[in-house]
Image (cartoon, rainbow, N blue to C red):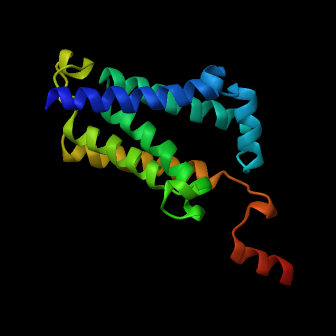
Amino acid sequence: MDAGLLVVRVVLGSILAAHGAQKLFGWFGGHGIGGTSGWLDSMGFKPARLHATVVGLAEFGGGVSLVLGLITPLGAAAVAGVMLVAVATVHWSNGFFNASGGYEFNLLIIATAIALAITGPGEVSVDRFAGWTLAGPAWGAAALSISAAAAASVLATRKPSLAQKPEESREERSAA
């Protein structure tokens, strides 16, 4: 079981850390803070540079936390929170399947991160070496609650332009 947890942590954490590095540093073909800021600004996240830094740090830091098994529930919460925002702003309107830009991949990341918060990182982890027992249903619930609260607070600051609002709002706008 510990070998399986190690594989899941390292793969998931590495993928998220790489995505964060794209946003923060422009590594792996990413656009860095400047490009990420422009993209987030176009989606109504203001101040965009702050949001770009936060999302990059959440992905990079959350990913590294999972790879190392270091304060695993916090890393899981960071990863799940970023994915919840991605689902709400980019993927939900595309339906479930990833082939259409849907949220299935993001849901898998969220579920895996929260599952790691519940099961714990396994024996080969900083948490275990430090003697910390940061696992169980309460830790999973805490990680999910933190990620949902963080995502909700980020989404509450979003100010999408008229072109970005949902279809049903267009009718209301044209009637006004």
Query: Quarter-wise, where is residue 41 in the image?
Result: top right
Count of marks, rendered view: 0
Q: Quadrant of the N terminus?
A: top left
Q: Which residue sits at x=37%, y=50%? A: 145
Residue 5 seen in this snapshot? yes
Q: Is residue 152 above or below residue 72?
A: below
Q: Which residue sits at x=43%, y=46%? A: 147
Task: Report the side of 152 relative to 74 (left or right).
Answer: right
Residue farthest toward the front in the current orientation of the protein: 99
Residue farthest toward the left in the current orientation of the protein: 1
Q: Is residue 111 above or below residue 76?
A: below
Q: Position of residue 30 (x, y in %)?
A: 65, 27
Residue farthest toward the bottom in the current orientation of the protein: 175
Q: Position of residue 174 (x, y in %)?
A: 85, 79
Q: Which residue sits at x=73%, y=35%? A: 37
Q: Position of residue 34 (x, y in %)?
A: 75, 28
Query: Quarter-wise, where is residue 28 in the image?
Result: top right
Residue 176 seen in this snapshot? no
Task: Report the side of 153 relative to 50 (left or right).
Answer: left
Q: Quadrant of the C terminus?
A: bottom right
**Nearest the camera: 148 or 68?**
68
**Nearest the camera: 36 or 50?**
36
Q: Which residue sits at x=57%, y=58%? A: 100
Q: Position of residue 155 (x, y in %)?
A: 60, 53
Q: Is residue 43 above or below residue 122?
A: below
